[in-house]
Every structure is written in structure tokens, then in C-alpha cells.
Image (tube, rainbow, N blue to C red):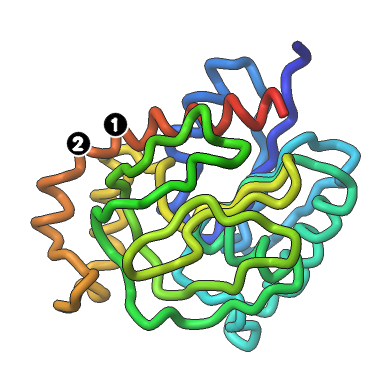
Amino acid sequence: MQPLRIHYFEHVPFEGLGCIEDWARQQGHTITVTQWHAPTVVLPDLLSIDWLIVMGGPMGVYETDRHIWLPAEQQYIADAIQQGKKVLGICLGSQLIAAALGAKVYPNKEKEIGWFPVQFNITGALANILPPEQTVFHWHGDTFDLPANATRFASTAACTNQGFMYGDRVIGLQFHVEVRSNDVLKMVEHGDDELTPAPYIQSAEAIADRSALADGANELMFEILEYMQKA
């Protein structure tokens, strides 16, 4: 198989590819990046990439007054989907994909920050790789309506739309299965001001104590990447 040309969008320096980079390097794929937080933003021609991966960040899709580049990013994602690229979005990335597909993004009733179980629908296209339930890492305050013609495959008690597929080439994950244990600690370091007591917000200590759960979550991420590679 020819090496894939994987391009990803980074919104903050502390939310990179995580274990996705480990997988891509091991497979011999090439990786390029657009850093939306950088002074100069460069977008590749869509003809020069095979995959687009859209990572997380603390901003909301609707905060276009504070982050004026969001509409351009959303349009690029929409164009990538229209041209049949394989597109994976994580957290903010899943929300941007939903918005690019015409769905509404808005604050969820509850923030989810910490390690919480996700329930998977195991009757869909990912049935062979998804467990009925797995505890994974979350850090989000927004949610989205399910895009038209998309299929939901993951939910939690606090957030109905945790994962969806659009066709067989586009996947959105509201939760973080890409983060390694050190990535989790880095996110806590940069976002500890959000860790105010609430039903679905864990303390920094509780998050750190369970950071070893990232290993199992990474295995699930690898399974999803393998699925996308074959799709």
C-alpha cells in the first residue's frame, strides 16, 4: 500500500495527534500540519492530501468573533468531505465536521471532563471493533445535533452524540481516545481552571490517578484508524 498523506489541523499547541502520530509513523505515512494558532496559516491543496484529521481545542465552533479563522476551517472541511477525502475529527474536530455538514453546535447541558464510560452501538459499520462500553477521556463543554444522513455510534449519560459516521469515510469522535497518559496530564496543566466541581467534572488528582486508562483507549484509536485505512 502506498504511504498515506495525512494532514491535520491543530488549534492549540497542547492538543496534537497523540497516539495517531505513533500509528502513522509506524505505518510509514507522511504527516503535515496546519497550526491555526500560528501567526501564519498555510492550507494545502486538497489534491495533495489523502486524509484530514481535525484535532481538539478550547474554542467553540460558534466563537467566530474571537477566532476569525473558524469559517475558513469549516469550509475546508466541507470541501474535503465533498471531494471524498477521509476525515476524522476529535472533540472540537467532531463539532467542526458536524457544522460543515449543516448541523448545529451549541453548549451542552453538562461539561464532561475526566474519565467516563462511553456506550457504543455495535450494530453499525464499526461493529467488529467497538466494545459495548469503554471508559475514555473527555474534555468538552459543547455538543451538536446529529448531521443529516449521519449515523450515531457512541453516547454517554451526559452527552447523546459522542460519535458518528457520515458515509464510510468521515468519523467524528467527541471523546479523546488519541491522548496518551502524558497528553492527559498536559491538558490538565493547561486547563485546570475548568476543573470546578460538577457532576461530570473530575478533579485534577482523579484524572491523573486514572491516566493509565489511556493505554486501552489508544488501542481503540488504532482499531478505528485501521478501519479508516481499509474503508
Where's residue 43, x and y in %? 78, 53
Above or below, comparing residue 158 to residue 175 in the picture: below
Left or right of 52: which side holds 175? Answer: left
Which residue is at the front of the view, 201 or 167? 167
Give amino acid for label 1: Asp
Q: Residues within 10 Å of mark 1 (few under 14, many from 20)?
A: some
Q: Residues within 10 Å of mark 2 (few under 14, many from 20)?
A: some
Which labelled disc corresponds to residue 215?
Answer: 1
Which residue is at the front of the view, 22 or 177? 177
Residue 147: image quadrant is bottom right
* Quadrant (top left, top right, bottom left, bottom right) of the N terminus: top right
Where's residue 89, x and y in %? 59, 52
Residue sitting at 61 percent across and 82 percent down?
62
Query: To which residue does mark 2 refer?
Result: 212
Q: Secondary structure at mark 2?
A: helix
Query: Is residue 147 visible to us here?
Result: yes
Left or right of 15: which side holds 24? Answer: right
* Quadrant (top left, top right, bottom left, bottom right) of the C terminus: top right
Where's residue 86, x and y in %? 74, 40
Where's residue 223, x and y in %? 50, 27
Residue sitting at 40 percent across and 74 percent down?
141
